[in-house]
Amino acid sequence: QSPETTGLAELKKGDYDTAFKLLSARVAANPNDAVAQRALLRVYLETGRYTELETTAKRLLQKSPYAGAVHHELGEALAATGRYAEAIAEFERAAAAASIKLESDLRRAELLDLTGQEAPAKAIYESFVRFYTDNNPRTARELTLVARALVHLERFQDANDMYRSAIEADPQYLDAQLGAAELFTAKYAYSDATLFLEDAL
């Protein structure tokens, strides 16, 4: 395992104790390691340790106030604990960082939707369609985020095509498999959903 990827495979597998130890050591050795910072916060998020996530994120932001990924994970913790207005503000701050803009914009739109602010949410979802048209993205991550926005716009066939393109781009990208399965489950097409879930497993 190279130093740049230490702890990431463990996080992906759900071996949270090992991931936590390795990622904590990485952040201690290099406080500017943005990948390790985000992965460490993700361990807290996935294990429901929201208070620790919030404390750690705020400490990291004192040193690097523009760390988009840290703002994003803090937004996820705030959303998980029902503090939607604060979460929306964090996702907006996170979106200033180009590397995480799409993800943060999408989560902000989903929370705006959740809190009855449909018009601004729809405007953000529609910006994903423009992003796709203008940039012709090729990565599984970008295609999956566009697909999720299309689901919110109720363009289900387009979303299905986009998920399939994402899976073609990277069959190992779990979010695409799970997103497609969720779409088919919502449409009661359980046999199709099962195929995506089997691939994901």
Image (cartoon, grey):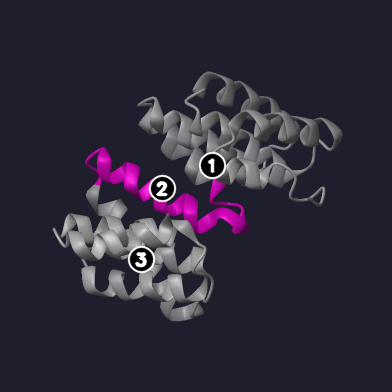
**123 is higher (above) or lower (below) than 89:** below
Q: What's drawn in magenta, residue-wise?
A: 94-117
Element assignment for label 3: helix
Q: Quadrant of residue 56?
A: top right
Label drawn at residue 107: 2
Of label 1 and label 3, which has the lower sequence position? Answer: 1
**182 is higher (above) or lower (below) than 88:** below
> What kind of residue is marked 3?
Ala
Q: Residue at x 52, y 22 (%)?
A: 49
Q: Quadrant of residue 128?
A: bottom left
Q: Nearer the viewer, residue 175 or 111?
A: 175
Q: Nearer the viewer, residue 195 or 2?
A: 195
Label drawn at residue 72: 1
Q: Main secondary structure of the magenta part?
A: helix
Residue 151 is covered by the magenta coloring:
no
Q: Which residue is mark 3?
A: 147
Report how far apart the C-alphas of labels 2 and 1 lie in the structure: 9 Å
Element assignment for label 1: helix
Residue 99 locus on image (x, y percent): 61, 57
Q: Residue furthest left?
A: 188
The answer to whether residue 178 of the structure is visible from this angle is yes
The answer to whether residue 124 of the structure is visible from this angle is no
Report how far apart the C-alphas of labels 1 and 3 lie in the structure: 20 Å
Q: Residue at x 35, y 26 (%)?
A: 82
> Where's the C terminus, which quadrant?
bottom left
Of label 2 and label 3, which has the lower sequence position? Answer: 2
Residue 79 locus on image (x, y percent): 40, 33
> What kind of residue is marked 2?
Arg
Q: Residue at x 16, y 62 (%)?
A: 189
Residue 69 locus on image (x, y percent): 61, 45
Label 1 vs label 3, nearer the camera: 3
